[in-house]
Amino acid sequence: MALSSIVRMPVPAILPPAIRLTSLTGSQRYPHSSALFCTVKHSNLSLHGSRKSKAGLSVRSSKSKKQPSPDESLLRVLESEISKAAVEESDGYTVVNSSSVSSTPCLDEQVPKNLPFKIQDNPGQQMIMLTREYKGETINVEVYTPAEDEDEDEDEDEYEDEDENEEEEVEEAKSHKGEDEDEDDSVDDYESRIPLAVKVSKKSGPSLEFGCTADLDGFEIDYLSIKDPENAQEDDIAYQGPKFSDLAEDLQDALYKYLEIRGFNDNTARFLHDYMTSKDRKEYTIWLKRLKKFVEE
């Protein structure tokens, strides 16, 4: 019966008086403790939410910044490229014989005083014309800006098919090129070749046309053809002779001498190589500026 009474008694009744007093007084002393906890918790949540809100606002504001249009981006790239090209142009020389250049020269290259040709150079064109008279003959030389080396593209295709050992050999060969800085500076000049055509005409009858290439070493004759102005339509089917390299050596030497006495020699070829390399850079700058002007309008 006593055990049954104890079981039915409420839990606080069976606790010692000290514990009941402590529990009671604690609750009475801090009646707002739970409310304070809720307030602090709510404050923390509000602060966290505020930070998230600010972060989201920052992301949205960064996204809302105006992005440059494709045209504006293109103009920026063009301006940068024009600046780079202008630096390359600063390597030119001062004209010492401007009377040899007719029309409006587009560059400031040094023309040799003993150059027997008149230079016709029109800005915006990829070629120049050299002319002179020699003992009743008219000699015209058409000179073009540097041509891309076709062999270079073929070499790139071959490198793709080579195995790792061959690639290492190529890289090793390239590393040797960097040993001499002076040699590196002239690599591009030696690799570029200037195509040109020398045409020797008389007052009447056919003319001789020499197809040549010029570089810093001089010039080489690639082919020789005979042109008949009266039968221009038949030139395409006319026999053009063998390859120049297949001609007898003494005949090749005689043809080189034939051009040299008419004023076209290695010195002229080297000058034209420098001249056209400089013209190519300047024409590129002109082209960039024209492109920029078109985009701006």
Image (tube, rainbow, N blue to C red):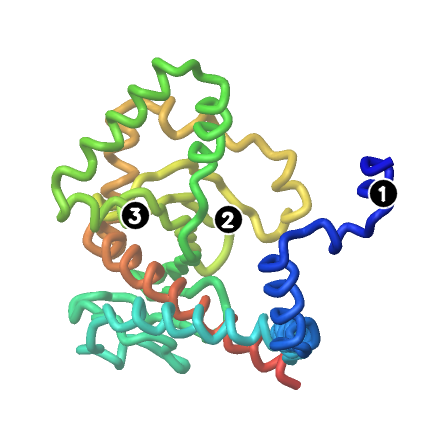
Q: Amino acid at mark 3?
A: Asp
Q: Which residue is mark 3?
A: 188
Location of residue 243 in the rendering, given as x and y in whole percent from the top left corner: 43, 27
Mark 2 near mark 3, Cβ–Cβ under 8 Å? no
Q: CA distance from mark 1 to mark 3?
A: 111 Å
Q: Which residue is mark 1?
A: 5
**Which is more N-terminal, label 2 or label 1?**
1
Q: Residue at x 30, y 71 (%)?
A: 87
Q: Tell me: 26 left or right of 224.
A: right
- At mark 3, the secondary structure is helix
Q: Amino acid at mark 1?
A: Ser
Give the mark toward the camera: 1 or 2. Answer: 1
Up/down of 214 relative to 78, above or below:
above
Q: CA distance from mark 1 to mark 2?
A: 142 Å
Picture quadrant of residue 18: bottom right
Q: Tell me: 91 left or right of 200.
A: left
Picture quadrant of residue 238: top right
Q: Which residue is mark 2?
A: 206
Instruction: Please tell me how crowded label 3 is: few (under 14), some (14-19), or many (20+) other residues with Cα within 10 Å.
Output: few
- At mark 2, the secondary structure is loop
Q: Residue at x 32, y 76 (%)?
A: 101
